[in-house]
Structure formats: C-alpha cells, structure tokens
Image (spheres, helix red, strand yellow):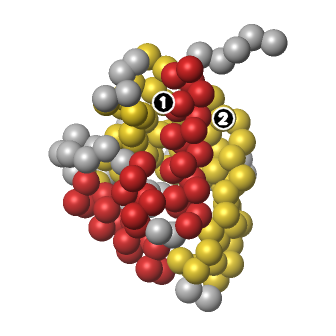
Amino acid sequence: MTALDPDVVQVMEANANFYRAFESLDIGRMEAVWAKGDHIQCVHPGWSVLTGWSAVKASWEMIFSNTKEIRFTLTDVLVRVKSPLAWVVLTENLLSHVEQDVTATSVLATNIYEKTDGIWKMVHHHASHVFSSRVAFNKEVTH
C-alpha cells in the first residue's frame, strides 16, 4: 500500500472538517474552516455567487438558523492538490430537516482550498443540485 501525500491527507481532513462544521450548524466551526478575505466565494444550490467572507458568513448564518438538522454521506470523492491550491469534487448525499420539511437529495460540490502558513483553508464552495436524467433539456440554452 502506497502512503498518501501529506498534502492530500491534510486536504481530506480540511474537507471533513467543513462537513462536520456544516452538520454541527455552528457558525464558529464553519468560520474556522474558511479563509478570510475578499477572494473567497460560495455558491449554494439556487443562489447567486457570494463573494468575500462577510457575505459568505451571512449565508451560513441564514442556512443554520433555518435548519434543524443536516447529515451528509459523501460519495465519488476526488481530491487533487497543486499547492498552494487543492480541490475536492464530490457528491453530497444529504438528509436535511429545514423548518417542517425533511428531504433527501444529492448535490454535486466542488470545494477549493488554499494553503496559507501551512494550513489548508476553504476559499470556494460550489454546490449544485443533481437533476434526474429524465429531465428534458432545452437544446437552445447555452452557457
């Protein structure tokens, strides 16, 4: 068995800390995993791009205040490191209790980390809902 690169192990741990913070619904724990600054960004499913720690923090506060419980099972996890950046692409399979609704859904996510002073901190989180393959796509839509 080949030992994993230490940076890969650290990024995997940083990513695990992000999801533990999310499940805890604790803004202090979420704040600890993020870099601070104007360059960070977050895209929650169905939301516009949020830029800068102030906007990103406010989004987590809103999500946490409306969520009673959330649990993740992560699948299809792919970690790549090109120091000082690293990215994790995965599927978030989640069970959530928001207001009176309990839902199960899958979300595709990309998490980008930046190594500063030897510590990997999140600088970008982008999550998008997975749509059923039965959904008809309009061929005239381009991006």
Mark 1–mark 2 CB contact (< 8 Å) = no
Please state the horizontal and vertical placement of residue 137, each as a whole percent of the image: 57, 47
> What residue lies at 36% left-to-right and 48% top-to-bottom?
34
> What is the distance, in whole Å, between disc 1 and disc 2 at their CAs?
10 Å
Judge left or right: residue 128 versus residue 134.
left
> Under tag 2, what secondary structure?
strand
Please state the horizontal and vertical placement of residue 140, each as a whole percent of the image: 45, 41
Point out the residue furthest to the left here.
38
Q: Name the residue nearer the viewer: 72 or 3.
A: 3
Q: Name the residue nearer the viewer: 8 or 6.
A: 6
> What residue lies at 37% left-to-right and 57% top-to-bottom?
31
The residue wearing badge 2 is: 77
| Residue type for callout 1 | Trp
> What residue lies at 58% left-to-right and 34% top-to-bottom?
12
Q: Name the residue nearer the viewer: 36 or 3.
A: 3
Task: Determine the image quadrant of residue 54.
Answer: bottom left
Please state the horizontal and vertical placement of residue 44, each as a whole percent of the image: 43, 57
Quadrant showing the C terminus: top left
Quadrant showing the N terminus: top right
The residue wearing badge 1 is: 87
Q: Name the residue nearer the viewer: 55 or 122.
A: 122
* First of labels 1, 2 by sequence position: 2
> Under tag 1, what secondary structure?
strand
Task: Look at the image and tell me whether residue 124 can be seen.
Answer: no
Point out the residue furthest to the top here.
2
Judge left or right: residue 132 versus residue 36.
right
Give neighbour class at mark 1: few <14, some 14-19, many 20+ (Cα, 10 Å): many
Residue 60 - label: none
Point out the residue furthest to the right here.
1
Task: Look at the image and tell me whether residue 75 can be seen.
Answer: yes
